[in-house]
Every structure is written in C-alpha cells, then in structure tokens.
C-alpha cells in the first residue's frame, strides 16, 4: 500500500522578481547537527539553527531548537558538538521541530535558504519529514561553497572557519547549528558584497551562478 504524504504548506520562499537587487532581499541561513552522516539509515537530526540575513547584513533574528533523535548520541558526536543526551531526550520530535523552523522562515519572509554545503542540511530536513510521511516545497537554496568556487575556482577547499578567517568575519561556536549558521551568514554577506563589486547585483545574477554561470578568477581582498 502506498501512503499519501501530507504536504506542509508553510510559505518558505517569497515570490520575487528576477531583477530584484540582492540588497533588497532576505535569506535564511541555516545549519543542522546530526548523530552522524548516515542520515538515510540510522542517523538522526539533533539540532536546527538559523539566522536571517537582510540586505547585506546579518540580523538578530535567530532560531534554535534541539531535536529528539529517538536514539543515543554517539560519544564522538557529543564531544564534537557538545550536545548531550539530556539536551535532546525531552526536546521536540522532528516534525514539530521542523514546523517551528518553517514558521520562523515564513514570519521573516525569506527569499530562500543559504548554507555551507547546504545540500546535506536540505537532505536532513527532507529525510526527517519523509519519515513522518510529510513533504514540502523546497525553496531555492544557495551554497556558500558554490559562491566561493565561483570567485576562485582553482582554490583549495577549506573548512568554514578557515573561510571566516580569510574574509575577516566573525567565528561563532563551531559544530553547533546556530553557531555554524551565524558563521556562515557572516561569510555569506562578505561574499554578497564582493559579488556586488564584480557585477552580481540581482537575483537573476545569483541564480545564474547557481545554475553554472561562467566562473571568475578574482582575489578575496
């Protein structure tokens, strides 16, 4: 028997004209923490964090929740993230946690998602909702790594913290969802300013990069 999935109807992306200046747009920068990388098998989400970027500025509109994974957190993950079992045992289950996150996005009228290696975090949300027999309209997303590679396609891939140092932006608590979201948001705004100086000024320009537009060789300074 095929079970019909319930579609969540939160407005996760505003309808925006392609010629909208990036300075006039809002984005939700987010991150997840999990019990491991095998999210399609036994691993589960344990935290969601997000922050709104408006124009080229990181705002104080933030979101954070622990998530009950219905399993033990491996000691190596607790050591890496500092998230303890006691913090998730009585946390919201995945569906209400994700719905709370979606309500945050809807409230702040986001134009899309941003993340560092964002495809993993998107997959975490999708799979957790799939387990609950739910689906949703995935918003357009932008990956800071993709933007960095556009600016410097020959550069060696580095850690998020290394890019923050490279751009001279703030570093927040690492391997925690809100801390990594904030670190990514500051890197993202630095990238937007740099892209603006190189003629990437509208949503259409940013989508062109996302869809494989010609790369540029420019310095980070």
Image (tube, rainbow, N blue to C red):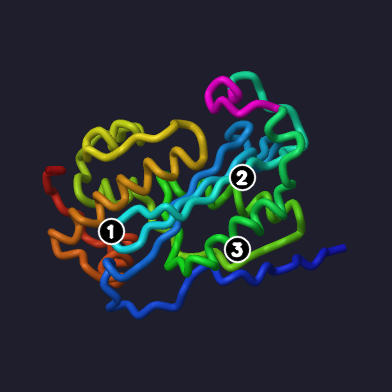
Q: The C terminus appears in which quarter of the rendering? A: top left
Q: Earlier in the sequence, mark 2 or mark 1?
A: 1
For the residues labelled 2 and 1, the Cα–Cα distance comes to: 25 Å
Position in image of residue 220 (x %, y %)? 15, 43
* Magenta portion: prevailing SS class: helix
As helix, strand or loop, the secondary structure at mark 3 comes to helix
- At x 62% / y 54%, what residue is drawn? 126
Closest to the observer: 157 or 96? 96
Q: Which mark is residue 65?
A: 2
**Structural crowding at the residue carrying mark 3, measured as other residues with C-alpha within 10 Å and reported as few (<14), some (14–19) or many (≥20):** some
Categorize mark 1 by other alpha carbons within 10 Å: few (<14), some (14-19), many (20+): many
Q: Which residue sits at x=30%, y=45%? A: 187
Does residue 114 sit above or below 43 in this rendering? below
Which residue is pictured at 44% across the width and 39% down the height? Answer: 180
Would residue 34 be counted in the magenta stretch? no
Mark 1 or 3, nearer chain start: 1
Q: Magenta part of the protein: which range? A: 77-85
């Amino acid at each position: 028997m095929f079970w019909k999935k319930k579609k969540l109807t939160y407005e996760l992306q505003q309808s925006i004209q392609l010629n909208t200046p990036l300075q006039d747009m809002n984005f939700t920068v987010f991150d997840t923490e999990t019990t491991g990388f095998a999210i399609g098998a036994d691993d589960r989400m344990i935290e969601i964090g997000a922050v709104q970027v408006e124009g080229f500025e990181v705002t104080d509109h933030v979101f954070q929740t622990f998530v009950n994974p219905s399993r033990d957190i491996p000691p190596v993950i607790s050591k890496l993230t500092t998230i303890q079992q006691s913090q998730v045992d009585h946390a919201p289950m995945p569906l209400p946690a994700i719905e709370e996150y979606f309500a945050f996005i809807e409230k702040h009228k986001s134009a899309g998602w941003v993340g560092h290696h964002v495809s993993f975090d998107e997959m975490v949300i999708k799979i957790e909702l799939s387990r609950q027999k739910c689906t949703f309209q995935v918003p357009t997303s932008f990956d800071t790594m993709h933007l960095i590679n556009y600016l410097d396609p020959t550069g060696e891939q580095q850690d998020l913290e290394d890019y923050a140092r490279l751009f001279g932006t703030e570093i927040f608590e690492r391997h925690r969802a809100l801390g990594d979201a904030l670190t990514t948001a500051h890197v993202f705004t630095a990238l937007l300013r740099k892209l603006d100086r190189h003629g990437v000024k509208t949503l259409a320009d940013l989508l062109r990069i996302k869809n494989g537009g010609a790369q540029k060789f420019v310095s980070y300074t």
